[in-house]
Image (cartoon, helix red, strand yellow):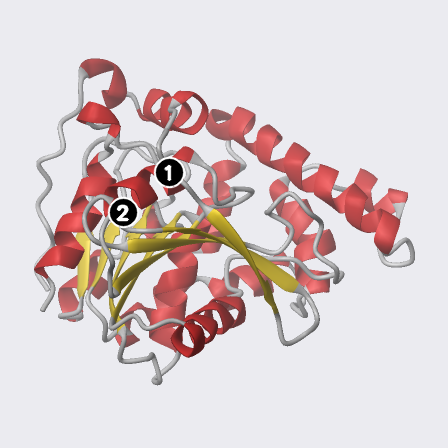
């Protein structure tokens, strides 16, 4: 599929990728979204919390929203998407990953960039308990990697899944990790690492034999966290094995559901391998848009509707 040309041109301040990232992540506010929480028991004894918001009219269409690293169902990029979709005939289901809904999950394991088995359980649950004829998925950052991996790794995607949009996607996890470890991203890395270690200390109270103070002291970078916790808790050899197995890039050629990737060229979280130009050109179901500006899950827009929120709605509405 030919690459999608982009007409995104924000005001001057938002042409700075860091400003766009920080503003939309820390200062944007979204009001008027009314969510109802459902707890979904998982097959391994753990749970996920789903935050539902309804269309202003009865709907047979649903969008599933997947947040990024250390996000949740109340982040502005999630509620902003839910609000616009609700206003345009879609119900929304915001998935909180294990341990991300304000309550520690019950198992030693948690979530990561490739845990598509949890997404499958959410979709199976929805298909069994709801009556939607059209289901769409929108993922951000880590959540974008999840949706693309899910669509490309399995031949049996339910027929109700009609389309997907993935925003600011680290398609190559190792490449993205290397970028996050650069000095340019030190403040983001410190924030992520602080949140992850705080959760790990909560885990330590539940599993003192599996997480020691010595282990936690060894975590100096995000890669260290993946070496010491993520890989061990989820049956990978080490961080590099985790990145290799879970990067969505390798699954893009197999995607059969119309899917749009929007990765800004000034996204400081994404390395060069995170822009899958050749994969998009060779797969008629894969669309790639690379705006010059936008930052990481930024994309400021007028009337508090981001560019990617409007773009996702338009993309889903035009699908057959």
Task: Kindly give the residue lying farthest to the bottom in the view shown.
Answer: 156
Q: Which image quadrant is residue 287 in? A: bottom left
Quadrant the N terminus occupies? bottom left
Q: Is residue 184 above or below residue 78?
A: above
Q: Nearer the viewer, residue 1 or 57?
A: 57
From this viewpoint, is residue 129 visible? Answer: yes
Name the foreground residue: 233 vs 118. 118
- 194 horizontally vs 278: left or right: right
Question: In what element is the residue under mark 2?
Answer: helix
In the rendered image of this protein, does residue 192 appear above or below residue 57? above
Tell me the number on the disc at residue 33.
1
Q: Total of numbered circles in the picture?
A: 2
Give the residue drawn at x 70%, y 56%. 105
Which residue carries the number 2 mark?
Answer: 86
Tell whether label 1 touches label 2 (CB within 8 Å).
Answer: yes
Q: In the picture shown, does residue 198 fall above or below 103?
A: above
Left or right: 75 as drawn, with respect to 315: right
């Amino acid at each position: 599929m030919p690459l999608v040309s982009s007409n995104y041109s924000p005001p001057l301040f938002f042409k700075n990728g860091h400003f766009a990232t920080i503003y939309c992540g820390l200062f944007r506010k979204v009001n008027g979204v009314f969510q109802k929480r459902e707890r979904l028991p998982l097959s391994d004894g753990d749970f996920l919390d789903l935050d539902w918001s309804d269309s202003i009219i009865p709907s047979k269409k649903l969008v599933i929203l997947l947040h990024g690293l250390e996000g949740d169902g109340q982040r502005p990029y999630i509620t902003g998407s839910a609000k616009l979709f609700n206003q345009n005939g879609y119900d929304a289901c915001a998935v909180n990953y294990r341990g991300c809904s304000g309550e520690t999950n019950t198992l030693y394991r948690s979530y990561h960039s490739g845990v598509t088995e949890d997404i499958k359980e959410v979709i199976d649950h929805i298909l069994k308990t709801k009556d939607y004829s059209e289901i769409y998925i929108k993922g951000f950052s880590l959540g974008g990697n999840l949706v693309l991996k899910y669509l490309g790794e399995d031949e049996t995607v339910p027929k109700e899944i009609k389309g997907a949009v993935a925003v600011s996607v680290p398609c190559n996890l190792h490449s993205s990790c290397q970028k996050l470890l650069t000095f340019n991203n030190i403040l983001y890395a410190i924030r992520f690492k602080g949140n992850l270690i705080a959760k790990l200390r909560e885990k330590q109270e539940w599993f003192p034999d599996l997480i020691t103070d010595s282990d936690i002291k060894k975590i100096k970078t995000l890669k260290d966290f993946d070496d010491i916790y993520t890989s061990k808790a989820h049956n990978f050899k080490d961080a590099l094995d985790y990145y290799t197995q879970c990067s969505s890039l390798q699954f893009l050629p197999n995607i059969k559901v119309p899917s749009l990737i929007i990765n800004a060229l000034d996204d400081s979280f994404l390395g060069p391998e995170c822009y899958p130009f050749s994969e998009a050109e060779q797969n008629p179901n894969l669309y790639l848009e690379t705006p010059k500006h936008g930052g990481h899950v930024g994309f400021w827009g007028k009337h508090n509707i981001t560019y990617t929120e409007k773009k996702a709605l338009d993309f889903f509405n035009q699908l057959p």
